[in-house]
Image (cartoon, rainbow, N blue to C red):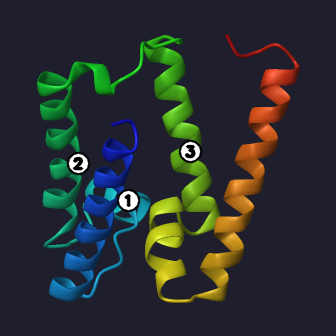
Amino acid sequence: MQVVGPLFGGALIGLAASLLWLSHGRVAGISGLTAAVVERTPSPVALPFVLGLVVAGALLRLVVPSAFGVPTVGLVATALAGLAVGFGTRLGGGCTSGHGVCGVSRVSWRSIVATCTFMATGALATLLVTRLGGAG
């Protein structure tokens, strides 16, 4: 049962990315789509796609609250972390969804290198935080 949720979620991510590519020729990079909404760049798909993410998350929270872990940090820390991630994705020219889901599937070497970098950095950060006693 624990495998079904992530497997289903991954399939939905792939389906959404494929449908966006096939219907509009756009890569489903969440940082790029969110930036288009925030910067008010004309895009027929950015606002509906981002709103769909928010609404789907809210609905899942209502229907299956156990799908979400118990917050270990406050709202301010979460917001600051989100802003840091947003800044980093704009600085780096993409995010894990754009590079990892869409770019790797298109065999983009830039995306493959970026995804390997994301994963290695995430693993290193996790190792450092757990070894230094920062994680609960």
Residue at horizontal 39 percent and vertical 36 percent from the top: 2
Q: In 3D space, how far apart are the residues under numbered discs 1 and 2 (Cα atoms)?
A: 9 Å
Residue most extreme to the front: 1
Query: Residue 34 falls in which quadrant of the image?
Result: bottom left
Q: Relative to 42, does residue 50 appear above or below in the rendering?
A: above
The residue identified by callout 2 is 53
Of marks 2 and 3, which one's residue comes earlier in the chain? 2
Left or right: 52 in relation to 33: left
Crowd around label 1: few <14 · some 14–19 · many ≥20 (10 Å):
many
Q: Where in the figure is residue 134, as x and y percent of width and height?
A: 76, 15
Crowd around label 2: few <14 · some 14–19 · many ≥20 (10 Å):
few
The residue identified by callout 1 is 30
Label 3 element class: helix
Left or right: 18 in relation to 93: left
The residue identified by callout 3 is 85
As rendered, which of 40 and 89 lies closer to the eye?
89
Q: Where in the figure is residue 39, as x and y percent of width and height?
A: 32, 58
Residue at horizontal 13 percent and vertical 23 percent from the top: 62
Q: Where in the figure is residue 126, as x and y percent of width and height?
A: 74, 34
